[in-house]
Image (cartoon, helix red, strand yellow):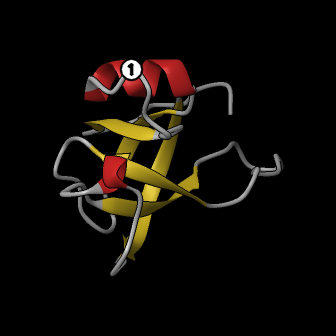
């Protein structure tokens, strides 16, 4: 699981059936100062998150499929929570 910031939305006219009726959001991983991020990624929204929200993301395919109840789904990342605050002491 990682913390990230929602940067925007993805709109598709044609997509895989596992993405039908699901919002896709662009997420930027949050890292400590001086650390490098793996880069932005797309995640399925399961929480009604919005642009600017800090979110908790499950980036492990099996866990993401379990959350969405899609055992054979082609989904790797799913937003599972909206974070109210973060307190980092060792960052």
- Location of residue 12 in the rendering, given as x and y in whole percent from the top left corner: 37, 77
- Location of residue 66 in the rendering, given as x and y in whole percent from the top left corner: 35, 18
Q: Quadrant of residue 32?
A: top right
Callout count: 1
Does residue 70 appear left or right of residue 59 in this picture?
left
- Location of residue 5 in the rendering, given as x and y in whole percent from the top left corner: 45, 56
Label 1 CA crowd tier, 10 Å (few <14, some 14–19, many 20+) = some
- Location of residue 9 in the rendering, given as x and y in whole percent from the top left corner: 36, 72
Which residue does the image show at 38% across and 62% down from the upper left? 25
Does residue 79 appear left or right of residue 47 in this picture?
right
Which residue does the image show at 26% across and 60% down from the upper left? 23
> Could you say whether the residue bearing mark 1 is in a helix, strand or loop?
loop
Which residue does the image show at 40% across and 66% down from the upper left? 15
Residue nearest the observer in this picture, 25 or 17? 17
Quarter of the rendering occupied by the C terminus: top right
Q: In which quarter of the image is residue 60?
A: top right
**37 above or below 13?**
above
Residue nearest the observer in this picture, 65 or 85? 65
**Disc 1: which residue:** 71
Q: In which quarter of the image is residue 67?
A: top left
Which residue does the image show at 44% across and 31% down from the upper left? 87
């Amino acid at each position: 699981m990682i913390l990230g910031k929602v940067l925007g939305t993805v709109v598709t006219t044609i997509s895989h059936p596992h993405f039908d009726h699901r919002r896709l959001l662009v997420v930027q991983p949050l890292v400590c100062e001086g650390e490098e991020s793996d880069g932005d990624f797309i995640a399925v929204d399961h929480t009604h998150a919005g642009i600017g929200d800090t979110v908790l993301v499950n980036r492990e395919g099996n866990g993401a499929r379990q959350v969405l109840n899609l055992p054979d789904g082609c989904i790797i990342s799913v937003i599972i929570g909206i974070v109210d605050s973060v307190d980092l002491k060792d960052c």
